[in-house]
Amino acid sequence: MIIKEMFKKDIDRDIRGVIKADQTSEDDVHQELDEYVVTRELRRHFSKFYENYLKGIDGKTDKVGVWISGFFGSGKSHFLKILSYLLKNGEVKGKHPIDFFEEKIEDPIIYSNMKRTANVPTETILFNIDSKSPLDNKSKDDAILRVLLKVFYEHRGYYGDNPAVAELEKYLDDQGYLEAYKEEYEKVAGEPWVNRRNSFYFDSHYVKTALLHATDMTEEAVDNWLKHGVDNVEISIEKFAKDVKEYIDSKGSDFHLVFLIDEIGQYIGDRRDLMLNLQTVTENLGAICQGRAWVMVTSQESIDSIVKVKGDDFSRIQGRFDTRLSLSSISVDEVIQKRILEKEDFVVEKLKAIYPEKGAILRNLISFRESTAD
């Protein structure tokens, strides 16, 4: 028998050691769900997470923050992605994410909580904050709010790179004019609106013509908005939270929205203002949306260690991020055994029979001296 034929899964497949938030093709998602190993440690984290998340489903809660910490290689980004799949529970190659976990989760209570949550209509917004942040954004005190605003606009199909354009699209959408506006814009500009909205300020004459033809706005109102409104778009945490609440309410009474932010700790660094910005955004979403909008983040540092390092009183942010999950790398052998080395049943019996004869040879081949093993 050839060694490669011993394994349950094809060992020639692309096995990703690093999981990235932006890898979301159907093949990638299916492989991640199929090969995800729920270790003993992860069972505890799933249990704690769902216990707290259900508070926002069965009632109201303002503790809507989840802080997932762990060093590089601990699997925190993978865990965040898996949570996004499970909460959204959209079909992947004819199978729902929750169905992949029926055999992975041995505890019936945990699986029951997972299944009940999967039946709640939910949309997830998963992203790496560094990749979504404009180059000059980090220097601003409200940098995290601006990134959240951008991804929220993009999730709704609006132009997230420019709040003024996004607010125009939102207004037109609310009034029922958006599709008509897009048609009129393409007629006068010769290109679809979505292809040219990045050059909005150069095409204001096209915008004006399309608005006059597609809506009941007067020429005076359009001129006034183009002259004054564009540069005075309100960006505030309270307005963002209210917009999220309005969106959630429009989707039904049971609907939930979850922001999943990868590598927030790296983005914040030692910036106290960014930490407070994150805390205030989470606090407002909790107070206004009452458990129907959640913020989940990953960081190499735990909140406690950030408090210790920065020396500031972050008791408020600790209160908002009430669900704290710390991942370690101690289960890496368990993951490798199940994800890669798991063998066919008939092979196991053959290997057991051969091992007494070959065991000593193998031990000699893989023995290391001094620090070589490290």
Image (cartoon, grey):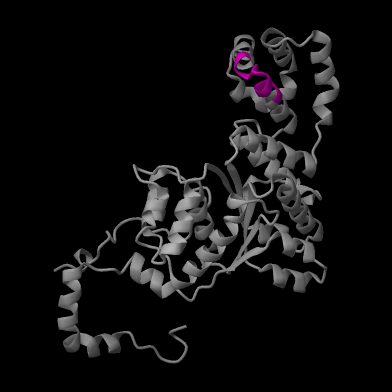
In the image, 175: left or right of 232? left
| Residue segment shown in magenta | 171-180
Q: Position of residue 192 (x, y in %)?
A: 58, 19
Residue 160's place in the image compared with 201, above or below, is below
Quarter holding the N terminus is bottom left
In the image, 22: left or right of 338? right
Q: Position of residue 195 (x, y in %)?
A: 59, 24
Q: Position of residue 178 (x, y in %)?
A: 63, 19
Q: Residue at x 73, y 69 (%)?
A: 306
Q: Nearer the viewer, residue 277 or 63?
A: 63
Q: Residue at x 71, y 10 (%)?
A: 209
The reply to whether the magenta stretch includes residue 10 is no
Residue 13 appears in which quarter of the rendering?
bottom left
Residue 46's place in the image compared with 205, above or below, is below
Can residue 136 be seen in the rendering of this structure? no
Q: Residue at x 60, y 44 (%)?
A: 257
Q: Residue at x 47, y 56 (%)?
A: 114
